[in-house]
Amino acid sequence: MKNSTKFFATAVAAVALFFTTSANAQKLGVGINLGVPTTDGYSFAVGADARLQFDVSKQVSIPVTAGYTHFLGKTVGGFDVPDFGYIPLKGGVKVFFDETGSGLYGLGEIGAGFGVTKGSGTSFLYSPAVGYAFSSGLDLGVKYEGLSKGGGNLGQVALRIAYGFKL
């Protein structure tokens, strides 16, 4: 299956989820991710994402996240490791530790990473995170994002700087 077909199918699934959810409120957040790879061969990771968040209660939300992440390759033992890019599509649960629905939170997401680098295919994607959501809309988080495929793993520890607003 071509990457464009996979991307279209996941976009349709995300829109279907959006329209069938009976959540109380919705928020949209846009962010940048700056990461340190945990895998040899890469020097830095940078990405951007959009997160649609459905509030189930003041303390529990269901986020759906999509974006783009790019790992910059480096030279290891005289061999140039090529850059690697992928489109993450994740869903999960976000729990705020404060009853007001802001402040410190924990987040767990799983999904798929659709490789855009030639021959990279699709990987299982998982991402635990902790963060702090300010009432102004600013959201700062630290996450681990890992990709697993066929015995190979690629990961990063990243800082996410985002701004969210209600829809």
Image (cartoon, rainbow, N blue to C red):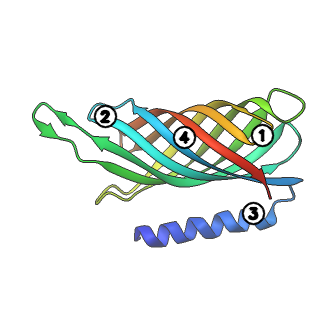
- Mark closest to the chain's N terminus, 4 or 1: 4
Dot 3 crowding, Cα within 10 Å, few <14, some 14–19, many 20+? some
Calculate the distance from the C-alpha at mark 4 to the C-alpha at mark 1: 28 Å
Q: How many marks?
A: 4
121 or 74: nearer the viewer? 74
65 or 139: nearer the viewer? 139
Q: Say whether marks 4 and 2 touch (CB < 8 Å).
A: no
- Is 113 situated left or right of 120 in this image? right
Calculate the distance from the C-alpha at mark 3 to the C-alpha at mark 1: 24 Å
Residue at the spot 31% in from the left edge and 34% down from the top edge: 43
Q: Where is mark 4, residue-wise?
A: 126
Dot 1 crowding, Cα within 10 Å, few <14, some 14–19, many 20+? few
The location of residue 44, given as percent across then percent down, is: 36, 36
Q: Going by the picture, which residue comes out furthest to the left? A: 78
Amino acid at the residue labelled 2: Ser
Name the quarter where the C terminus is drawn.
Answer: bottom right
Check residue 136 in the rendering and tell me which mark sits there, or answer none.
1
Mark 4 or 3, closer to the camera: 3
Q: Where is mark 3, residue-wise?
A: 18
The location of residue 94, given as percent across then percent down, is: 73, 38
Q: Where is mark 2, residue-wise?
A: 43
Calculate the distance from the C-alpha at mark 2 to the C-alpha at mark 3: 36 Å
Calculate the distance from the C-alpha at mark 4 to the C-alpha at mark 2: 21 Å
- Mark closest to the chain's N terminus, 2 or 1: 2
Calculate the distance from the C-alpha at mark 2 to the C-alpha at mark 1: 33 Å
Amino acid at the residue labelled 4: Tyr
Q: Say whether marks 4 and 1 touch (CB < 8 Å).
A: no
Calculate the distance from the C-alpha at mark 4 to the C-alpha at mark 3: 21 Å
Q: Say whether marks 2 and 1 touch (CB < 8 Å).
A: no
Dot 4 crowding, Cα within 10 Å, few <14, some 14–19, many 20+? many
